[in-house]
Image: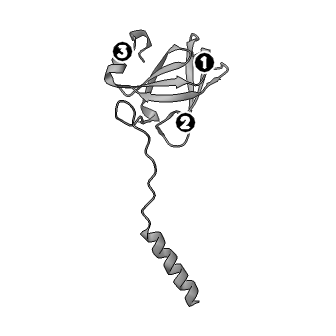
Amino acid sequence: MRFALAALASALGLFLAMPPAVSDPAPPQPSGRRACFFVNNFENWRAPDAKTIYIRVGLHEYYRLDLAASCPALLWPDSHLVTKWRGSNVVCSALDWDLKVSQGPQGISTPCIVKTMTALTPQEAAAIPKKFKP
């Protein structure tokens, strides 16, 4: 019994002496800030081509979503995004997106896989052509 208690105390001492595990934070974006937003702040989107989506979050934040493959449904008239969020209500990376595009309320949804999500600087957002700015 004494041996078991001594072993337990020794193991506990080693455990307490270890530095706490630190999870890797998301890598900073070129703009120097972490690209995260709450899903309820997602406002609007526009697609300049079948592989890129610009989204607006709140009034002044913009993100670019680059897709893994062409998603021509983005360019259809009356197309709309069908989004399901993975995990929490915070979006921080391409992995958080479950994105589909549909035309009309009864249309067939086409999946579009998000490869990267990039927070745009105010200068980059200002450079988006007006017809593609969400």
x and y percentages locating residue 118 in the rendered image = 44, 28
Quadrant location of the C terminus in the rendered image: top left
Point out which mark residue 127 bears: 3
Query: Where on the picture, by quarter, is residue 2?
Result: bottom right
Label located before the other in sequence (2 or 3): 2
Residue 95 — which label? 2
Circle 1: residue type:
Ser
> Within 10 angstroms of label 2, few (less than 14), some, or many (20 or more) residues?
some
| Local secondary structure at mark 2 | helix
Q: Position of residue 107 (x, y in %)?
A: 65, 18
Residue at image location 46% in from the left, 37% down from the top: 92
Image x and y of residue 1, in percent:
59, 89
Q: Secondary structure under badge 1?
A: loop
Q: Which one is in front, 42 or 32?
A: 32
Of residues 63 and 18, the one drawn nearer to the viewer in this rendering: 18
Quick one: which residue is furthest to the left in this view?
A: 123
Q: Is residue 19 above or below residue 80?
A: below
Q: Which residue is mark 1?
A: 70
When the figure is inspected, residue 18 is found, relative to residue 43, above or below; the finding is below
| Res 125 label | none
